[in-house]
Image: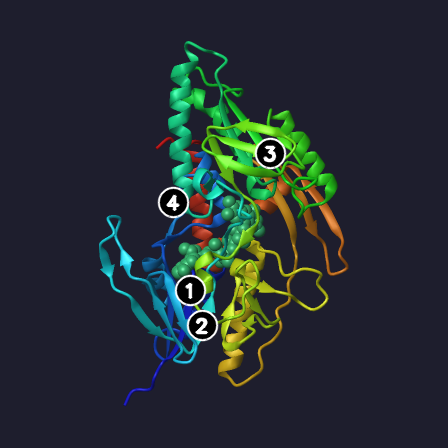
Amino acid sequence: MSERKTQIVIVGGGAAGLALARKLGNRYGRSRHDIILIDRNRSHIWKPLLHEVASGSLDPNLEDVGYGGHAAIWGYRYFNGSLEKIDRERRTVTTAPLKDEDGAVIVDRHELRYDYLVLAMGGVSNDFGIEGVREHAMFLEDRKQADRFRQVLLNACLQLNAKRRDDPGARLSICIVGGGATGVELSAELVNCARSLRDYGLEVFDHDALKIHLLEAGPRLLPALDEKVARNVRGELEGLGIDVRTDAMVERVESGRLHVKDGGIIDARMILWATGVRGDNSVERMSDLELTKLDLFVTRPTLQTTLDDRIFAIGDCASCHLPGMDRPVPPRAQSAGQMADCVFDNLDRLQKGKEARDFVYRDRGALVSLSRFATVGNINTGPSGGKLALEGRIARAAYMSLYRLHLLAIHGWLRGSVQIVAAKINKVVRPTVKLH
Ligand SMILES: Cc1cc2nc3c(=O)[nH]c(=O)nc-3n(C[C@H](O)[C@H](O)[C@H](O)COP(=O)(O)OP(=O)(O)OC[C@H]3O[C@@H](n4cnc5c(N)ncnc54)[C@H](O)[C@@H]3O)c2cc1C
């Protein structure tokens, strides 16, 4: 009788899960292991690129990674489905019926066995239960949403272009809620987009055609960065004509309108919500694993979930409070990649009968790109907590290196390096704005 394979199931092929699937597939292959990646989508795009996809400055088709092809190269199995249930006693996961766009079932509810399970399902924006957000705001959580934002933006720009022939003062108002990296970067990308549109046939378009409002409920932008950097960023954005408001708490959202506490009403044709990270609501119904109030899986420092040694949680869907840290590990791309590496080692250790090791988070700093106008931030220079402020070309190179590291993590050194060169060539030969 053939030996039963060790089955490692990863749910979620994002920054954390896809890097882990590649490494596990590459290490163990298919002979004595079955590495399975489950994702509800069929392709992956790195989330920090989504604001560029939304504004049209990046063609997502060039950066998309199809799971099927990736799995074939790296020796794991890809299953298209959405996690619905975890049965810890029977060690199985069940995926919901997979439906086509018309709602017809393509693949029925499906059960998969696991020896080890890694949850890497990412998170969603936190709407804080504010009335009207889910109904009237847009989000930037996956490619579909970024594509939709771009389509709505382009349609509104075309309409405005026609209107401006008779009314040269007409403007398109866009409100972005959330002064973190996503909100700040998208604001700058939109200004860049508006400045390019005249060259693309929207002849009465210029930099003041868009009125961009950026609202932050806290006292300053970019809480993850130094105060001085955040102040400089605010100055840059205001210099680009963006209306930046801090201490601006949105109380209610209606169609085309936001009510701000002590700040009146803002009319906006497009509203983008980009605040905080929480777990998806559906997570509550999936299992009896311990969750935080924000529906994140609580893990021990080893990244194993508190109630089950065989189940790990990594990336944005995990809440890992390490000894000596005031807060849980932040939901960032660098944390996701580092957690994937830690779980890769721990899975090896557990299979060899050794104890899992604690995760060590190395905060390398944070950088923000204001499109082609500026890149700023700080990098951490060592364990003593030293910080180096960066701007200009060096900051741009450091910012780009985070994505390059992701490409190397999911494609390996050889293929990853080719992808990096291909991306550079595309930047030169492709139009700077995607208008379809
Ligand atoms: C617009 C934007 C800009 C950002 N910019 C930065 C930045 O500049 N720097 C930085 O460090 N971080 C940034 N982040 C945060 C960073 O992208 C995340 O921290 C990182 O992607 C988390 O990785 P992850 O693997 O946990 O989740 P994700 O990358 O979100 O991947 C989760 C995967 O799980 C799948 N999935 C979800 N639910 C299910 C389910 N039920 N069943 C099956 N599959 C499921 C999803 O389809 C997805 O593929 C940004 C995020 C956004 C949204």
* Amino acid type of the residue that numbered disc 4 sits on in the rendered structure: Lys
Please state the total of marks drawn on the protein image.
Answer: 4
* Residue contact at pointers 2 and 3, CB within 8 angstroms: no
Is 195 situated above or below 330? above
Residue 147 placement (x, y as % from top left): 39, 40
Residue visible at 38% across and 21% down? 159
Q: Nearer the viewer, residue 290 or 150?
A: 290
Single out the mark in the foreground, 2 or 3. Answer: 3
Q: Which residue is mark 3?
A: 260
Which quadrant of the figure contains the C terminus?
top left
| Location of residue 52 with respect to 95 vertically, above or below | above
Question: Which one is in front in this view, the residue at disc 3 or the one at disc 1?
Answer: 3
Neighbour tally class for label 4: few under 14, some 14-19, many 20 plus, Cα within 10 Å: few
Residue type at tag 2: Leu
Residue 117, disc: 2
Residue matched to label 4: 144
Q: How is the image coloured?
A: rainbow
Q: What's under tag 3, amino acid-wise?
A: Val
* In front of the other: 317 or 201: 317
Q: For the residue carrying disc 3, how many other residues have a C-alpha within 10 Å: few (<14), some (14-19), or many (20+)?
A: some
**Mark 4 vs mark 3, CA separation in Å:** 28 Å
